[in-house]
Each structure stands twice: as C-alpha cells, then as structure tokens.
Image: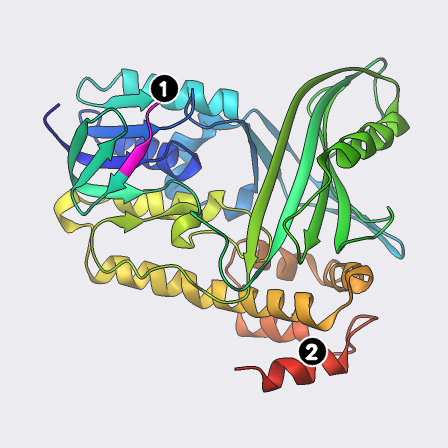
Amino acid sequence: MGRFEFVLAGGGLQAGLVALAVLARRANARLAIVEEGRAIGGNHTWCFHARDLPSAARSWLEPLVVQTWADYDVVFPRLSRTLSSPYCAITSARFAAVVGDAMASSPQSQRIVGRRAVRVDAHEVSLDDGTTLHGDVVIDARGPASAPKHCGFQKFLGLEIELERPHDLARPILIDATVEQHDGFRFFYLLPFDARRVLVEDTCFSRSPSMDWNARRAAVLEYAARFGAVKRVLREETGVLPMPWANDAPEPNGPPLVAGYRGGWFHPATGYSLPVAARLACYLAERPASQVFGPELGRLHREHRAQARYAEQLNRLLFHCFAPGDMRNVFERFYALPEDVIARFSALSTTWRDRARVVLGRPPRGFSLRGTLALAGAT
C-alpha cells in the first residue's frame, strides 16, 4: 500500500476532522483512515457552539453542519433562560458523506472500514486481516480504551423521533432539568431539526457508568409525548463518556500521537469534543508530517491542559461535594452567570476572572463541607 503521511487508527470525529483539514490544505496528501465499524463516524450527533470553532476550521468544517440555531434554552426549577449563542449540529450520516467525498477525491488517500487496528506503533498500524499500514505520523484516535481511574460519567440515550403533528419548539433546549433527579444530575436535551423531527436525549452526570437502557428509552418516549404523539422512532444513539477529575492521558512527546478522547483532547466538564478536535486538526494540517512533533505541539497541549485541568477540578467538586440529588443546583447556579462567562467556559478559553466567578460566592445548595474536607485530605 506504500507509505502514508498520516495513518489514523479509528474513524470517529477526530480522525475525520484531521482528514478534512489536511486535504483542504493539500489535496494530494497521502492519508489513510482505519475504522472498525461499517462507516466513518458511527452513529452520533455532534454539536458545538459556533463561537467555539477556530476560524481556520470554518471553511472545511461548514459542509458538515446540518443545522444552525441562533440561540438555545436552559430550564431549571428556579431558572429559565435563552442564551444568544449560535448552536450547530452535525449528524454521522453527513459526516460520513463529507469525509468520504474528500477522501475519494484524493487519489493517494485510502479509507478502510470493517477492519480493526490490533497494533498501533510509532509508524505502523497493523490490522486484523494481517495488513500493515506505514505512516510518517500515526494518530491513535480509537476512543478511550477504558474509563480513567478517577472520573464520573456522562451517560445518555437519545431517540430521533418524528411526531404526528408539528411541535412548538422555537430552538434547542440544551438542558431541561425540571425532571426527576436520580443517580446524579439528570436532564433532557432536545434538538428540533424540523417541524416534526426532534432528537430527544435523557442524560445523566453520574458516579456510575451503568444505566437501565430500557427504562431510559421509555422515559424519552414519555417526555417526547409532551410535544405531540410520536409517529415513529427514526434512530437511537447511546453513550457513556468519562468526566475525569484527574488526567490519565499521555503527553504528546512522540509517535504515535494519541488524539481524541483517548488522548484527553476534549472538554472534561461538558463532554464536548468538536472544538478541541478541530484545533488539533488545524495544527496537523498547517505543517508537514515531519514537523508534527516539537515545541509547537507541546505548546498547544499545555494550553489545552491548562484549561482542561480547571474543568477537571470542577468535576472533582461536583462528584465529591454534592449528593446526586443536589448536583442540579451546581448547574442552575452556573447558568445564572453572564453569557460571556458561560461562553468562554464552553470554549475552554476561560480567564482567571471567569474561574473565580464560577467558584466564589455563596455555594450551590447541597454543598457538603464533609466532602470538601475529605477532598482536602485525599492524596
């Protein structure tokens, strides 16, 4: 198969964004993606706040976006608010089509699906059929091999549904936390794609990765009935994402480059990964493979870690200092902050004033002094 500039193990969000960024800069780049599933991108919906996206990524990322809303809502027992931040959605079907077209237009690129990477080394990726791919840079973006040692979990079940009649949703609801709280911070998340088609997710920030999927499926259908009778379920997606309070990800000191969730390139406190993945993709596209590892990559990683470390500290407080039924109060307090503070936190670009604003002042209801003292005494 020859030698590639980039060999990407895993065909998820990070790998697809790297492919698009590199091919947008160099249409004849030699690039290979290996994906164990049947298609690039799997079965996901990725969303992001438009202002979080690096400007260098906009031209090649815009074709992925299926819908943009001008604003969004959050709803809590004592707070309802519309935030004026454009919000964008990418579906896995669009993702697979756009990435596939870009790679098909590059004669020296190769997309391999239905094959598992069994060994990922500095310059080689071995597949389960005995094939070995050679690359100047190997990127391991296969997703987390296991949960970090110290983490909570964001777990969700979403159903994309078609209603019998039009709903009255004017914009996405990123958090409806007026529902019963159990097992942690629980909320519903809604994306209205058109007048009758809505993605409805039951999400929980929990100390446990386990979830009764049948019960959650029934809960989503019951909640969706608030907006009209459900005509049919179009698609289902589930996920269990780590919310670490300590970093187990490797430093990017040399090949292979561990990226995506496996490499810690995501927002620890929200689970949003697209803006961070896009930043790394832009970095890789802006230089030849021979110059990927060096001071600039270290600087990018340090900047990311400085922001991510603060988010991890907030996770630590959330999961240790609040009982499951009180976690909601943390987020209700956060979403009462000024919009620019919320926006910078979402983008992992907080200032020291933002960080102080989040943690100082009267603590949310349910804050446990015992939990704080236990944290202070923990090694």
The CA span between labels 2 and 1 is 48 Å
Amino acid type at mark 1: Gly
Eyeballing the image, is 45 above or below 342? above
| Image point (78%, 74%), residue name | 367
- Closer to the camera, 337 or 123? 123
| Image point (48%, 51%), residue name | 266
Corner quadrant of residue 115: top left
Residue 202 is situated, as x and y percent measured from the top left of the image, at: 74, 39
Residue 115 in the magenta stretch? The answer is yes
Left or right: where 165 falls relative to 131: right
Q: Which of marks 2 and 1 is in front?
A: 1
Graded by Cα atoms within 10 Å as few (under 14), some (14 to 19) or many (20 or more), the crowding at tag 1 reads some
Left or right: where 200 falls relative to 366: left
Q: Name the residue under label 2.
A: 360
Left or right: where 355 falls relative to 198: left
SS at circle 2: loop
Amino acid type at mark 2: Leu
| Image point (46%, 29%), residue name | 62
Q: Sequence-wise, which precedes: disc 2 or disc 1?
A: 1
**Label annotation for residue 172:** none
| Image point (25%, 24%), residue name | 129
Left or right: where 354 falls relative to 273: right
Residue 367 in the magenta stretch? The answer is no
Graded by Cα atoms within 10 Å as few (under 14), some (14 to 19) or many (20 or more), the crowding at tag 2 reads few
- Closer to the camera, 242 or 16? 242
Q: Mark 1 points at which residue?
A: 100
What's the magenta region? 114-118
Eyeballing the image, is 358 above or below 31? below
Residue 26 is situated, as x and y percent measured from the top left of the image, at: 21, 30
